[in-house]
Image: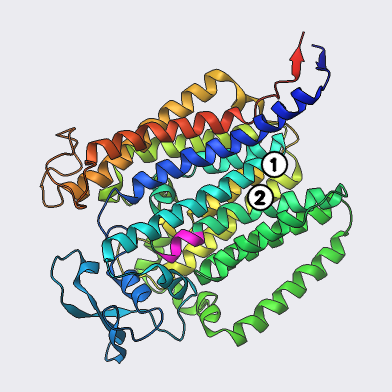
């Protein structure tokens, strides 16, 4: 099939620039709309941003009249008196609440404290909207700066790992939101920056965006920092090996140097040491540890909605579809695979198992740790598998395939969003999460003229619209005509 480019007049060049810009902008706007609906879906202390995190934000600057009083050490750790509104109560009293240790807390809390005002509800909603805006802008920038193949990699990574954990967490006022966002974006920014630098193109903006994504990890959680450091080191190693800029024995020295730096960092940062301590002698003396070790794979699958079922995020049907689509796309990307693909996926898989096993060692509950701790690594795994492939993965661009997975994901997203809102609207109902009543009206946590049914319908429609617009950005340009 012959292809030719239409003669580029001034008018066609302007329209082309508008076309290239509008796609990422519209996709980002639709993602923002979807995340806004999740922001309004449940009250203040829901999900992964309970009173503990909100109290830590309100006490992020220490003692503050009306926001954080009697701040300081307690028998149980650190605490402060915070407004009852942060507990979902309507009273105006200030009560004691445990907060994060100010000596080890992340920068997330004092940064978000900027947006804590007199009205707790409006402040939390503002924080959620800002979180949604940051996530949407990062996604839009990834699509805007990516080549066609990297667009496919980024879109696949985000599309098939978002539901239900990540999409429900990104808008929330918890450090985990930044941790997810950093893991989902840093690998792509680094690959794009390295590629542009290799082609002697201007890559400053991409290095800045990569630095910002690293900041999100550093400012949120230690495990997120370790995950980003691992994925960045993996990408750099593959890049240098692929370009033959480093031979195998030098790579060994490179890995050894990284190990030495890690050991030095463990001595400087006690929190890092606690995350990377492993006691082989006491590990297999407990039957509980072995039990949890056996169930680690299914707990990882919980990140896609299958495994330890979260009541407010829908039925296991979401996980069945999520795991099925993730596995299908990952396996198809390995058609005529190369060594770099295999190396990346195996390395990330082993790292995930090691991370979950490390968490298991300190886990006190009988049911193993949830996959929420490593779900962003699934995003990195799928993204690298496609980005490092020898092919463009055109099967994802077929209309029939897109219609199938967008329809399935649209259904699972609607189920997850409905479950979250039903949990908020009918929290004490014994039949909660059974979809016995498709109307969410009759109770609403936020005093607004917009009812829950409207919020749900907007979110349920905005999500598949986001996927449709985003995947259309991978299509051929309008000037590329086939004959």
Residue 209 or residue 278, whichever sits in front: 209
Q: Is residue 11 left or right of residue 327?
A: right
- Work out whether residue 358 can be spotted: yes
Residue 146 is marked as 1
Q: Residue at x 44, y 68 (%)?
A: 359
Residue that badge 2 annotates: 188
Q: At which x and y percent is residue 244?
A: 89, 53
Looking at the rendered structure, the secondary structure element under dot 2 is helix
Please state, as top left, top right, bottom left or bottom right, where the N terminus lies in the image. top right
State the extent of the magenta-drawn residues as a range. Answer: 174-179
Classify mark 1: helix, strand or loop.
loop
Identify the residue shown where x is 75% and y is 23%.
Answer: 12
- Determine whether label 1 and label 2 are within 8 Å by CB: yes
Name the quadrant containing residue 174. Answer: bottom left
Q: Is residue 163 magenta?
A: no
Residue 255 image point, x, y percent? 75, 68
Left-right relation of 262 to 327: right
How far apart, in angstroms, are the residues tagged by discs 1 and 2? 9 Å
Comparing 401 with 273, the one in front is 401
Residue 163 visible in the picture: no
Instruction: Give the vertical position of 220 relative to 483 (above or below).
Output: below
Prevailing SS of the magenta stretch: helix
Q: Position of residue 429 (x, y in %)?
A: 10, 47
Question: Which residue: 81% across, 22% down?
Answer: 9
Tag in front: 1 or 2: 1
Is residue 255 left or right of 330 when viewed as pictured?
right
């Amino acid at each position: 099939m012959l292809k030719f480019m239409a003669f580029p007049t001034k008018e066609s060049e302007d329209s082309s620039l508008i076309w290239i810009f509008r796609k990422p902008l519209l996709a980002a706007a639709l993602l923002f709309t979807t995340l806004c609906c999740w922001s309004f879906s449940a009250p203040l202390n829901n999900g992964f941003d309970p009173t503990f995190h909100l109290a830590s934000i309100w006490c992020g600057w220490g003692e503050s009249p009306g926001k954080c009083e009697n701040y300081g050490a307690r028998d149980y750790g650190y605490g402060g008196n915070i407004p009852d509104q942060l507990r979902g109560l309507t009273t105006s009293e200030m009560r004691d609440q445990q907060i994060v240790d100010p000596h080890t807390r992340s920068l997330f809390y004092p940064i978000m404290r900027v947006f804590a005002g007199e009205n707790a509800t409006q402040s939390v909603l503002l924080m959620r909207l800002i979180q949604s805006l940051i996530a949407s802008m990062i996604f839009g920038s990834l699509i805007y700066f990516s080549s066609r193949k990297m667009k496919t990699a980024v879109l696949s990574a985000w599309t098939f790992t978002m539901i239900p954990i990540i999409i429900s967490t990104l808008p929330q006022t918890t450090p985990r939101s930044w941790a997810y966002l950093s893991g989902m974006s840093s690998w792509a920014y680094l690959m794009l920056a390295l590629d542009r630098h290799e082609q002697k193109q201007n890559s400053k903006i991409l290095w800045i965006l990569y630095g910002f994504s690293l900041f999100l990890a550093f400012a949120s959680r230690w495990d997120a920092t370790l995950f980003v450091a691992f994925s960045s080191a993996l990408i750099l190693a593959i890049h240098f090996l692929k370009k033959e800029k480093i031979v195998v024995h030098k790579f060994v020295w490179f890995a050894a140097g990284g190990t030495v730096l890690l050991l030095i960092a463990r001595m400087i940062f006690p929190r890092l040491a606690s995350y990377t301590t492993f006691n082989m002698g006491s590990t297999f003396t407990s039957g509980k540890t072995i039990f949890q070790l056996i169930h680690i794979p299914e707990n990882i699958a919980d990140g896609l909605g299958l495994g330890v079922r979260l009541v407010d995020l829908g039925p296991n049907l979401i996980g069945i579809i999520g795991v099925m689509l993730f596995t299908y796309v990952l396996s198809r990307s390995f058609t005529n695979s190369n060594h770099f693909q295999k190396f990346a996926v195996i390395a990330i898989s082993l790292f995930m198992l090691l991370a979950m096993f490390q968490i298991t060692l300190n886990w006190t509950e009988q049911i193993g740790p949830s996959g929420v701790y490593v779900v962003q690594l699934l995003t990195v795994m799928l993204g690298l598998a496609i980005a490092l492939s020898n092919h463009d993965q055109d099967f994802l661009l077929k209309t029939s395939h897109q219609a199938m997975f967008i329809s399935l994901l649209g259904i699972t997203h609607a189920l997850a969003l409905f479950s979250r809102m039903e949990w908020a609207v009918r929290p004490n109902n014994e039949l909660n999460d059974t979809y016995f009543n498709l109307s969410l009206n009759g109770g609403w946590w936020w005093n607004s003229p917009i009812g829950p049914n409207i919020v749900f319908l907007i979110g349920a429609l905005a999500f598949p619209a986001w996927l449709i617009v985003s995947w259309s950005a991978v299509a051929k340009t309008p000037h590329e005509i086939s004959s």
